[in-house]
Amino acid sequence: SSRHDKRTRLATPALHKIRNFPTCAATPARSLLVPRSPSSPRSGSLGTKTMLGRTLREVSAALKHGQITPTELCQKCLSLIKKTKFLNAYITVSEEVALKQAEESEKRYKKGHSLGDLDGIPIAVKDNFSTSGIETTCASNMLKGYVPPYNATVVQKLLDQGALLIGKTNLDEFAMGSGSTDGVFGPVKNPWSYSKQYKEKRKQKHQAENEDSNWVITGGSSGGSAAAVSAFTCFAALGSDTGGSTRNPAAHCGLVGLKPSYGLVSRHGLIPLVNSMDVPGILTRCVDDAAIVLGVLAGHDPKDSTTIQDPIKPFILPNLTNVSKLCIGIPKEYLAPELSSEVRSLWSKAADLFESQGARVIEVSLPHTSYSIVCYHVLCTSEVASNMARFDGLEYGHRCDIDVSTEAMYAATRREGFNDVVRGRILSGNFFLLKENYENYFVKAQKVRRLIANDFMNVFNSGVDVLLTPTTLSEAVPYMEFIKEDNRTRSAQDDIFTQAVNMAGLPAVNVPMALSSQGLPIGLQFIGRAFCDQQLLTVAKWFEKQVQFPVIQLQELTDDYSSIFENEKLASSCIIRNQNNFMLYSVHSLITSELVDSIETLIIT
C-alpha cells in the first residue's frame, strides 16, 4: 500500500555526492580546519568552581596534585545539583553516600594511594542500573521504593576505582522512549534551553521569551544522565543504549555519547529492556573522558555470559595527526527525506573535512536499511513482553491491594505499575509471539536482522574504517511540540539512524559538531567495526579537535556558572526534531499484512 511504502522508505534514489549539498546556516564556534589552541588557564592554583568546567582527566590531575580535594569537588557538584533541580535530571541524589565516598578518597590521596583516574570523580548513573542500598525505580510506579541488594557490574567497577556516586538520573519509564518525557517523575529539561546561545537566537528572531513553554527536550531515554553532565553537576554518567538511548540525548545536550560494542561491557545489573541489544552507554563532555570510563568498564564478567572472554587493554587514544590512511563511508540510505537541511549540511561539511585532510571518503550502501526500523520494533517489543513478565507483584516492586484472585492481583498490579507506553509495547510483543504469529513476525524479523548485520559487515570488509552518519533528524524540539505525537511515533522517528547499530552489535559514538541556527547543538554519529572501539574513538577524538564545539554558556542560570567558564571547555551536542509524521509506527501500523508480505518477499529474494 502507499501508506506502507511511505513508512518503510528511508533511502532516497541516490546520495550522489553528499559533499555537494548546499551550505547550511549552522555555524561552529571556529573554522572546522582551525586547530584548537591550548587553553590558557592550565597552570597555577585553580578554584573549586573552575574545576567543574574541566575534563575528567584534568580534574583527576588536579586531585593528584592537591589543587582540590574530593570532598570539595563533591560538595560543589551537590550544590549545583540543588540549584539546577528544576532540570529534573536526578531522581535520587545520594548525598550522604557520595560524601562518605569522598572522605575515603581523600584519605587515599593523602597517603598517595590513588586508585586511578576516576578516584574522587563525581559520576551519575541512570536509574535503571541496580545500586546496592540506593533506590532504583526505572522512573516507574512498579519499582518505586525498590532498593536492590547488589550493584550492577558497571557500577561496582566505577566504585572500585574510587568514583563518587552522586545520584541516580531520570529517564523514560523502563527506558522506553526518546525524549525522557514519559517517566513518572516528570520530563527532563535540556540545559541548553537556558543557555546564552539559545536565548540570543530567540531574541534575534523576536520570539517571545517564555522559559516555561520554550524549553527543549533532552532526548532519551538517558536524558537525565545527559542533562546531569551537560549542566556540570558531574563529570561522566552512565546511560543505557538499546536503539540509540545514549547517543540521542548526547546529541541533544552537546555531549559525547558512546555505545560500546555489544559484549564489551557487562549488562549484569542493568534492568533489561531488550537483552540482545542493551548496552551500557557512556556520556561525557569529551572523547578522551569516554575512553577513560570505557577502559574501566570493559572486560569479561562471569555474571554476564555475553561479555567478551579476551583480556582488555587500557583504551589510550593516540593523537591522530594523519587521516590519509582512513577510509570514511557515507551510507547513501541515511539521506532521509525528513533530514533537516542543517544536519544535512553539517554532514556534508564533515565529509569535506575528512577529504580535505587526505582521508578517502566514499559513498557506501546498506541496502536493508529501509527494513531496519520495522525489524527493530518487532524484536524490541517481543523482548520487552518477555522481560516485563517478571514484574508481577510477587517478588519485588509494586503490589496492588486486590486479593480476589492471583490473576486479578497480577492484572491490577501491572495496570497500576506500568504506564500506557510500557503496556502498549507488552501488548505488541505478545501479539508477535503468539503461536500463530511467531513465524510471520519474530522469526522473519530475526532473519532481516541478520541481513542488516551482514550489510555492515560487507561495508567494513570492503575497506571502510568508519561510517559517518547523522545521529538525529534535526535539533531538539520544544517539549510542547514533542508531546504532540505519541511515544511510539516519536521513537520510530528518533531511532532511525541509531537502532541498526544495536541490531548489528557495533560500536557507535555521537560527537557534537556545531550549533544550529536556533543556538542548539547538532552532532554526528561515527560507527565502527565490532570490538574496534579504540579505533572508533581515535577518529572521533580527531574530529572533535577539528570542529571545536562551543561550550554551553549558562552564566545567567546560577552564580556558580560565572566562574566555570573562565577556562576553555569542550562540550558536545546534537538535537533531534521529527517532522511530517515520519515513519508512523503504532501497534496497528506494525501489525499489517503489507509488512509481513514485504519482509517475506525480502527473505524469499
Image (cartoon, helix red, strand yellow):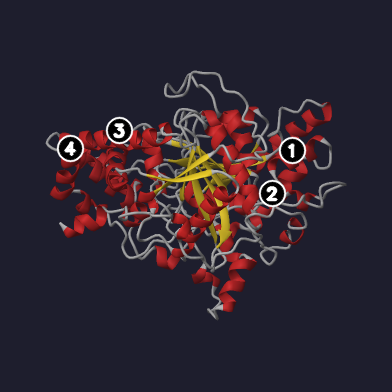
Instruction: Report the residue at 35% width, 41% height from top.
Output: 399
CA distance for labels 2 and 1: 15 Å
For the residue labelled by badge 1, is the local secondary structure a helix, a strand or a loop? Answer: helix
Label 4's element?
A: loop
Q: Toward which corner of the image does residue 460 lie, by quadrant?
A: top left
Reading the image, the residue beneath label 4 is 605
**Mark number displayed over residue 6:** none
| Residue placed under numbered mark 2 in the picture | 77
Q: Secondary structure at mark 2?
A: helix
Residue kind at label 3, given as amino acid type? Arg
Tell me which amino acid carries mark 2: Cys
Q: Residue 41: image x %, image y %? A: 82, 51
Which is more foreground, mark 2 or mark 1? 1
Frontmost of labels 2 and 4 is 4
Q: Does residue 243 appear in the picture of this structure? A: yes
Q: Residue at x 34, y 62 (%)?
A: 485
Disc on res. 450: 3
**Mark 2 vs 1: CB contact within 8 A:** no
Horizontal placement of 74 versus 501: left or right? Answer: right
Residue 166 in sight from this viewpoint: no
Q: Which class describes the residues within 10 Å of circle 1: few (<14), some (14-19), or many (20+)?
A: many
State the image coordinates of residue 86 (x, y, percent, origin top left).
Answer: 57, 60
Q: Earlier in the sequence, mark 2 or mark 4?
A: 2
> Judging from the image, what secondary structure is the residue with disc 3 in?
helix
Q: Is 516 drawn above or below residue 456 in the view shown?
A: below
